[in-house]
Image: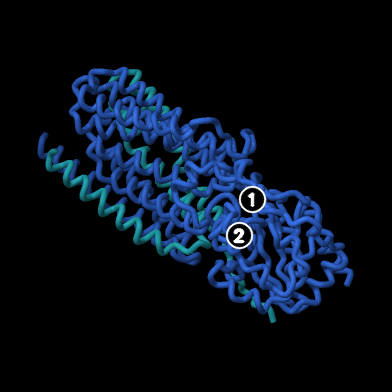
Amino acid sequence: MSEHLALREMAIQAIYLASAVFFILGLRGLSGPEKARSGMAQAAFGMLLAIIGTLLHAEIVRFDWILGGLLIGSFIGVVIGRPLFISVPMTAMPQWVALSHAAGAVAATLVGVNEYMLLGASAPAGTMAALGFEVVLGALTVTGSVMAFGKLQEILPGRPVTWPFQNTINFALLVSAVALLVIAAIHPGLSWAFWTMTAIAAALGILMVLPIGGADMPVVISLLNAYAGLSASAMGFALDNNLLIIAGALDGASGLLLSILMCKAMNRSFANVLFGAFGAAEQSSGQVIAGQEMHAVTPEDAAMRLAYARSVIVIPGYGLAVAQAQHALRELTDLLEKRGVEVKYAIHPVAGRMPGHMNVLLAEASVPYDRLYDMEEINAEFDRTDVALVIGANDVVNPAARTDAGSPIYGMPILNVDHARSAIILKRGKGAGFSGIENQLFFHPKTSMLFGDAKASLSRLVTEVKAL
Amino acid sequence: MSLTSVIQLYVFVLAGFVGFQVISRVPPLLHTPLMSAANALTGISLVGSLVAAGSNRGTASSVLGFIAVVCATVNVVGGFLITDRMLKMFKRDRKKTP
């Protein structure tokens, strides 16, 4: 019997090891768009191996609950998951990723809670500590992700919600959660400590995401990803499962790296994003010099200038996503290219509401990815460009980031739209953008403003270019 | 601290390191698919959920495990489907403009 068990355990470990290798190979596939899909197939295969390996566990004696859960879960995953990405537009991606985080974190939290309920007072300190981390990070991710979903879906106000002593209160809660974790680890019998800790973690998830503005959501979503990963790792420590530790660590690394990249692209520190309540009303720097006016342009003139330009760089922003105008944009650039205009797309790393948001949005409109250029690749080209076409982007092209030390976005690397020979800016209205910061570029003499909904404006431009 | 937990710590640190190395090579172009792939991987909590659901350690435990299995499976299946749909859209320009 024991030999049989040892054999079984070896088989499980071998399968887990293979699974971990496939996860890493899968992530490596993402280093280029050609191999990305096959890479993801490898990762999915790794996940299948993980499930098979787990089902071999001697502890698992009944399969009714498992089978039911897997079937219902797959059903929901496919039925909600698939139409979601046929009918629900790519613009809604960030919130669905957030919701999916919440689902995974619910699982991690419940497993932790269940394990605690079974072990109770007999839990060893090490296991309790791991369980504590798992549940704290899990619960925080659940509520935080739901809040992020609410903000992105605009059920909740996207602007930062602030109240007095916000950071002090959050910090106090965090400290008390950690203190309770220590108490629960030393005295696992004190169940109130464990439950209070869980409740505080859940509350923290809400309180920490509420003050963060919509424009900073890329960082939050990446960070929630990291938390969910670390929660899975903690589960691995609690259950003595190396595969959980590895996959969780990979996730944690990915989430952390992405959030660091996002912060760098905004030239802001982690702390500033998380505790700064960016875009709050009080930060209205960007003094508008009296007498300055924006120069509006008619669609006819704008179309003319685009059609007779030699080179155009398109700068998409969140406004493009909101207006669902990516297909209209594609149509316009196709027309321009047919006329011999050289068209490129400049993608700022934090344009949109999640890392790489604009790339996916344009890919959806079948813009070939070799036309999309990163900020560093394209910034030098603006000097040689006839027209920069800015669509629903604001902060990422605001020269105040370079010149105005008082501006909240000072120091953030921006796209050099002001270096182009001229700029046409598609904007919904005259007000300041999402972050509430005035943009001097819009008042510049070589800048023309085309007001209106991005989709309507682009369609007008398409008609006008056709008519030429 | 037992030897097992020390080894687990090794595994954690090294896996995190590998993750950093591999992921730092992902171009910004694919950052959204990366995030969604990482999201699918969080569904690894399915492993723990399956054990909880199948261990027959009381109804409460089974029910909690069952809910966990459902959620984690949604995460895994949804996550991989999303990622694949997204990656399918990335196309190179075959007919270069004349």
Displayed quadrant of residue A4: top left
Give the residue type at disc 2. Asp
Q: Earlier in the sequence, mark 2 or mark 1?
A: 1
Q: Is residue A351 visible?
A: yes
Rendered location of residue A162, percent (x, y): 56, 34
**Quarter of the image where the C terminus of chain A is located:** bottom right
Q: CA distance from mark 2 to mark 1?
A: 9 Å
The number of discs equals 2
Left or right? Give the position of A348 relative to A32. right
**Quarter of the image where the N terminus of chain A is located:** top left
Local packing at callout 1 (Cα closer than 10 Å; few below 14, some 14-19, many 20+) is: some
Residue closer to the observer: A39 or B30: B30
Q: Are marks 2 and 1 on the same chain?
A: yes
Q: Tell me, yes or no, whether the two marked residues, 2 and 1, touch with CB atoms within 8 Å.
A: yes
Left or right? Give the position of A50 relative to B25. left
Give the residue type at disc 1. Ser
Q: Which chain is cyan?
A: B
Q: Chain of mark 1?
A: A
Determine the residue positioned at 82% across, 62% down.
A295
Secondary structure of the residue carrying numbered label 2: loop
Would you name the residue on which mark 2 appears? A404
Q: Colour of chain A?
A: blue
A384 versus A114 height, above or below: below
Residue closer to the observer: A194 or A362: A194
Determine the residue positioned at 71% across, 69% down.
A388
Local packing at callout 2 (Cα closer than 10 Å; few below 14, some 14-19, many 20+) is: some
Q: Residue A136 bears which disc, if any?
A: none
Would you name the residue on which mark 1 appears? A285
Rendered location of residue A463, percent (x, y): 85, 63
Q: Chain of mark 2?
A: A
